[in-house]
Each structure stands twice: as structure tokens, then as C-alpha cells.
Image (spheres, grey):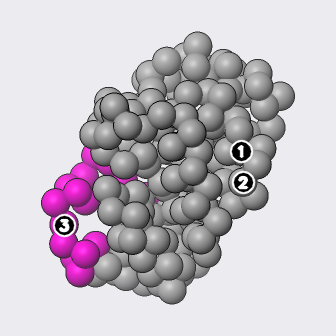
Amino acid sequence: SSKLEGIVVMGSNGEFVSLRESEKEELIRHCCKRIAGKKRVVVGTGSNCFDETLHLCNFSKECGADAVLLVTPFYYKGSMKDDVLEEYFTTVADRSPLPVILYNIQGRTGVNIAPETIVYLFNNVENIVAVKEASGNISQVAKIMQLTDGKIDLYSGNDDQVVPILSLGGSGVISV
């Protein structure tokens, strides 16, 4: 049976990238006030500005969110090598007061998080607890699950790939 466990605020399919910081705060505050305590609240805090990302992680905690969804900085595909991504996600996760769900969506950001990078982060950064995998690459999902012995909570980020991802040991879907 399907069950709605929570709500994602400011995922990648909305207009979050065009909102001012004050509008993002208002949206987080409003959603947490209405939903927190009833369902889980996950806030998309990723941005192109490191300081804004950290601010939104802290603000989300203050408002009662349960976790943050952290996408790669957008459109840095030439400079976002594996070691840069490892450093970025490690630094944010170490400073975030909330658990971090990595968000891999190359189609929107221009950057793919390699399976080895996801596995490294999952194994070495305590506050990284899951990944929303929306690369569209089932082979990549299979490799992540194989390299983690199925211990990672991997959520489908593509509604049309829920069943294949579940068959590989995925945990569910963070649905669009």
C-alpha cells in the first residue's frame, strides 16, 4: 500500500531558484507550521550560494523541519569534479543541524553525482542519511545499491522508475 510520509518544500520542480531569501523563509515557516508534527517535512536547501544553503539548513531546523534535501550547486558542470562534490557535501552536512538527503538530478543541475561519490559520502559523513536518485540511470542506481550492500536509503526521484528502483532495494520515492 502507498503511504504519504511527508512533504518536500522547495524541491527542484518549483520556482525556488527565483525566490528571494525572505520568500524562501516564509515558505519554510508556513509549511512547517502547517505540517510539522503531522508528517515529515524535508526542505530543499541547496543553492548556488554556500552561505544561503547553510542559512536555510539552520532556518529549517528552527521551523521544525525533519531533514534537508541537498542538490548539487547548479550549472557548475565543468568544475564540479568528484573531489569538489565530496568536499561540498561533507562541509554542508557537517554544519547542518538536520539530516541530509543527497539529491542527484543532473537534468536540472548539469552535474551528476557519481555512484562512488555517493557511496563515499554515505560511508564517511554521518549526517548524510539517504539519496534521492533522479539521474534516470538505472545502472547507476544498481551500482550504488551494490557498493553499499543495500544499506543506503535510496529514493527514486523519477515517478516512472519507482518499480525498477524498488526491485533493486530502493526505499521508496520522493515523488514529483
Q: Nearer the viewer, residue 100 or 90?
A: 90
Q: Are marks 3 and 1 in contact (CB under 8 Å)?
A: no
Tell me which amino acid carries mark 3. Leu
Image coords of residue 77 (percent x, y)? 34, 33
Dot label at residue 146: none
Choose top left, top right, bottom left or bottom right for residue 168. Answer: top right
The structure residue drawn at horizontal position 44% and vertical position 22%, both measured from the top left corner, is 136
Quadrant of image for the C terminus: top left
Judge whether residue 21 is colored magenta.
yes
The structure residue drawn at horizontal position 66% and vertical position 28%, both measured from the top left corner, is 116
Q: Residues within 10 Å of mark 3 (few under 14, many from 20)?
A: few
Q: Is residue 162 above or below residue 49?
A: above
Read off the residue under disc 1: 122
Q: Range of the magenta residues?
A: 8-24
State the separation of the CA atoms marked 3 and 2.
Answer: 30 Å
Tell me which amino acid carries mark 1. Phe
Read off the residue under disc 3: 19
Kindly report which numbered mark, 3 or 1, lies closer to the viewer in this rendering.
Answer: 1
- Is residue 98 among the parts visible in the rendering? yes
Q: Nearer the viewer, residue 67 or 56?
A: 56
Image coords of residue 144 (percent x, y)? 67, 26
State the separation of the CA atoms marked 3 and 1.
Answer: 30 Å
Kindly report which numbered mark, 3 or 2, lies closer to the viewer in this rendering.
Answer: 2
- Is residue 38 among the parts visible in the rendering? no
Read off the residue under disc 2: 125
Image coords of residue 123 (percent x, y)? 77, 44
Q: Are marks 2 and 1 in contact (CB under 8 Å)?
A: yes
Q: Nearer the viewer, residue 48 or 33?
A: 48
The structure residue drawn at horizontal position 19% and vertical position 72%, both measured from the top left corner, is 20
Q: Is residue 76 above or below residue 39?
A: above
Image coords of residue 23 (percent x, y)? 22, 76
First-in-chain label (3 vs 1)? 3
